[in-house]
Amino acid sequence: MNWKSNSVRLGVLAALACVLLLAVAAWASSDAGSTAAAAEAATQVATNGSKLPWWAWPIILLFFCFILGIIAVLAGVGGGVLYVPLVSGFFPFHLDFVRGAGLMVALAGALAAGPGLLRRNLASLRLALPVALIASACAIVGAFMGLALPTNVVQLCLGATIMFIAMLLLFSKNVVRPVVTKQDAIGLALGMNGAYRDESTGETIEWKTHRTLPGLLLFIVIGIMAGMFGLGAGWANVPVLNILMGAPLKVAVGTSKFLLSITDTSAAWVYMNKGCVLPLMAIPSIVGLMMGSFVGVRLLAKAKPKFIRYMVIGVLLFAGGKALLKGLGI
Amino acid sequence: MSAIKTPKEQITYANLLFYGSWGALALMLVTFLIYVFGVLTPHVPMEQITSLWSHPVSEYLEKANVPHGWGWVALIGQGDFLNFIGVVVLAGMTIVCYLTLIPAFLKEKQTIFAVIAVLEVLVLTLAASGIVGGGGH
């Protein structure tokens, strides 16, 4: 009874957080819209790009990312996947800077989570190493592709990808403990196996992978997409590691988070060298999202209302649609 | 039931990552406060940033006279570029952690993993160097 009322209370809070998130985004968007109109009216004049004073933006971003961090944890998605479409869709920042900040946000979250996951064997270094090499090399290629293509094309592709991610979250059925009867030769040679202790049951779970080659090949695509759009790629890493390669869900989630710290590093360097990381927007975003994640984890321990996940899917569809329209110039 | 042993190199990696990434985040926070409170004058004035961040990066680099690649090192004394110290430490942690893996794997005679670690260091260093595709687009 108590648990149920806690769940309901948390659900209402999360729903309010979602509404608040969209309200801030809509407000930022209206300022961005008036900015565009003002810019058109006075093209030759070096005007301030916003009606707001400069110091308002870091505060708005800090608050926005704090809420984003809570929602991301409760919905079980990475911060980057929500950050890039929402901030590029509703804030006045150009996609180049949003992708740069998005990668830094995903990187900071992954680096902070990595040590705990590695120590508890929930992330496997031996599973991550070969996969990370492929994904990080391809993320560099993706980053260059993303920076070379026209912005509207990237925005269109981003919109389509975000909508695909929403569908993936809606329909993919991850398996807690996939059955792997025989490990394949590549998995065996690379030592892609291990054991971890399940804290909820006290059981020791041994695991090994199969279908390693198709799994590794898919990380080429994942790396390119992570670099091109500045998204953390946990949404793609987990199903490939879990459903395709047969890693238990906890190991797949942990290894995926750790993997982001390597994949996003390579793409982040490219964006940084190209001048796409602006401290005024990247640092409040990182701090806000990490603070939100801490609060989110505490709330998560109490309950996990399922409908938050559906709400986030709705937010992603909305943000994806907005990116598509922006790409089409509508 | 045997106790689960976490490989030694994995523990070393985790410890290094823990101190490095949290240290970098703390550093970023301090330098950001120095920046926004105007303790050090920024290279690009705040008002100019807000007028340029809605334009492509190439325009920002040109109009604000911002160097690309590692050119920012020359501007380290300015409030905005001071922030890049923490950013670089954060983005460099993975390379540092990987460097510790190479001798550990070689000692265990795990040549495949040592080679993978060397290749990863090369990939990340190449990305960090700014050699590939240098310059704004």
Image: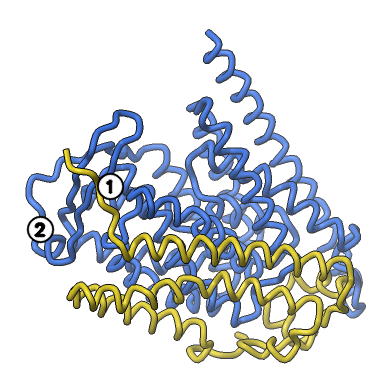
Chain colours: A blue, B yellow
Label ID, residue A184: 2
Q: Is residue A252 above or below residue B65?
A: above
Residue A96 screen position, x and y as percent: 63, 71
Q: Is residue A205 above or below residue B114?
A: above
Residue at point 62%, 30% (across, down): A14
* Quadrant location, the C terminus of chain A: bottom right
Residue at point 41%, 58% (across, down): A258
| A191 relative to A75 in the view: left or right | left
- Please name whichever residue, B18 or A44, is drawn nearer the observer in this view of the structure: B18
Residue at point 29%, 40% (across, down): A197
Residue at point 13%, 65% (across, down): A186
The residue indicated by pointer 1 is A242
Secondary structure under tag 2 reads loop
Instruction: Please tell me how crowded label 2 is: few (under 14), some (14-19), or many (20+) other residues with Cα within 10 Å.
Output: some
- Residue A243 shows up from this direction: no
| A261 relative to A289 in the view: left or right | left
Q: Is residue A154 above or below residue A257?
A: below
Label ID, residue A54: none
- Please name whichever residue, B77 or A226, is drawn nearer the observer in this view of the structure: B77
| A105 relative to B41 in the view: left or right | left
Residue type (three-letter) at the residue carrying disc 1: Asn
